């Protein structure tokens, strides 16, 4: 039997433990309440700040549209910083559109260096900030390009706008700041353009261009205008030329651009001068040299899979039909590359229908999923493949 003193002591200790646990629970509740209040206040503060910034941006562009005066490059730079701070591609797409138009309008100004947006690249204090800003703006343009549908009129206008932004700031040829005495600045500004292109490539520029070109060309009637097709193809080729046709850039160009269904057929019809650019850079020879290597060709085929490997073959055959003399010089490499691609496709050709096969218009029963989005282009792809005979 416990004595009275022992019972009292146990009761006292138990009460002390309970009181301590209650105090800990109360402290945890207070800490949780403070955390919740801080998060709510932070959310409300950020939302209020974002609303005020968006209001300021809208007022800026409203005044800009009135055309009362030309905005200086510094004003555009400051408002762009505020927009990029809160930018959400879906919510702020219209504001990004207006920003791009303001920037392009500033670049078109005559004999007004303070208005040219690119003039800030020459400011010692702003150069790095300007480069960071234009990279962000151009990547937002790429994100929007990946969402737009060229068959819709309003979207086609936006595609033209964003392609113009990308074309303008990846090459210095249209920059008025380089006229006359500014020619000495060209090497430095060309280096900035190369830096911008490298950033866009790392973020996925070629994937964006592939989506855009496929949406616009893989259909019964192409819905990319000559200007849009020329701009998109020029954008794709610029990094390759700037990198002096290195393998690191040739690979994405071949996989993402040259595999677009009937691309060469559309270029020959809509923008034949682009084929002249390919010829001037001797691109077909470079494609053959790249793909005749067994490992590189297998890597390209595995990245493309069967359907798009046929598209790549069709474009190469079409280019070869336009350069027969070059084809004679590189016949061994050309045959080697085509043979490897045909062997890759052959692995997935089945003798008869089964639960694991799909019908392909050219290859017959095929054991890989067929991209039925290519059906509208299959007529042109088949005509390209006929060059093989």
Image (spheres, rainbow, N blue to C red):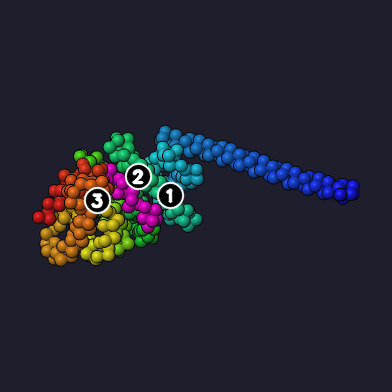
The disc label shown at residue 367, or none: 3
Q: Is residue 134 left or right of residue 354?
A: right
Cα–Cα gap, marks 1 and 3: 42 Å
Q: Tell which tag, 1 or 2, sits nearer the viewer.
A: 2
For label 2, the residue is: 146
Magenta stretch in the rendered image: 196-215
- What main secondary structure does the magenta stretch of the protein show? helix
For label 1, the residue is: 136
Precedes in sequence: disc 1 or disc 2: 1
Q: Position of residue 60 (x, y in %)?
A: 47, 37
Precedes in sequence: disc 1 or disc 3: 1
Q: Tell which tag, 1 or 3, sits nearer the viewer.
A: 3
Say what secondary structure mark 3 lies in.
Answer: loop
Q: Position of residue 143 (x, y in %)?
A: 38, 45
The disc label shown at residue 200, or none: none
Cα–Cα gap, marks 3 and 2: 30 Å
């Amino acid at each position: 039997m416990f004595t009275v003193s022992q019972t009292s002591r146990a009761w006292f200790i138990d009460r002390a433990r309970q009181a301590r646990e209650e105090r800990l629970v109360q402290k945890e509740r207070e800490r949780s309440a403070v955390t919740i209040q801080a998060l709510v206040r932070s959310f409300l503060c950020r939302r209020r700040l974002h609303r005020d910034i968006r209001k300021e941006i809208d007022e800026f562009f409203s005044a800009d549209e009135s055309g009362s005066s030309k905005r200086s490059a510094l004003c555009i730079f400051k408002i762009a910083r505020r927009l990029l701070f809160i930018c959400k591609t879906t919510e702020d797409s219209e504001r990004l559109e207006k920003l791009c138009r303001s920037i392009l309008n500033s670049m078109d100004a005559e004999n007004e260096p303070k208005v040219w947006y690119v003039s800030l690249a020459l400011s010692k204090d702003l150069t790095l900030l300007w480069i960071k800003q234009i990279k962000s703006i151009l990547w937002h343009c790429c994100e929007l390009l990946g969402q737009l549908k060229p068959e819709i009129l309003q979207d086609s206008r936006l595609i033209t706008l964003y392609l113009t932004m990308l074309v303008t700031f990846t090459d210095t040829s249209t920059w008025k700041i380089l006229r006359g005495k500014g020619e000495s600045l060209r090497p430095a500004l060309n280096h900035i353009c190369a830096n911008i292109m490298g950033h866009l490539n790392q973020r996925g520029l070629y994937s964006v261009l592939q989506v855009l070109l496929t949406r616009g060309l893989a259909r019964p009637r192409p819905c990319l205008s000559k200007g849009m097709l020329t701009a998109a193809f020029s954008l794709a080729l610029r990094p390759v030329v700037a990198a002096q046709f290195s393998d690191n850039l040739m690979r994405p160009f071949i996989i993402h651009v040259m595999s677009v269904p009937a691309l060469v057929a559309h270029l020959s019809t809509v923008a034949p001068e682009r084929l002249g650019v390919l010829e001037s850079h001797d691109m077909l020879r470079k494609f053959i040299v790249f793909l005749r290597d067994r490992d590189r060709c297998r890597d390209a085929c595995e990245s493309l899979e069967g359907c798009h490997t046929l598209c790549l073959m069709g474009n190469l055959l079409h280019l070869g039909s336009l350069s027969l003399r070059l084809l004679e010089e590189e016949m061994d490499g050309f045959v080697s590359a085509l043979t490897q691609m045909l062997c890759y496709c052959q692995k997935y050709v089945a003798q008869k229908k089964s639960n694991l096969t799909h019908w392909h218009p050219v290859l017959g029963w095929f054991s890989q999923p067929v991209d039925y989005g290519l059906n509208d282009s299959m007529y042109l792809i088949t005509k390209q493949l006929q060059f093989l005979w």
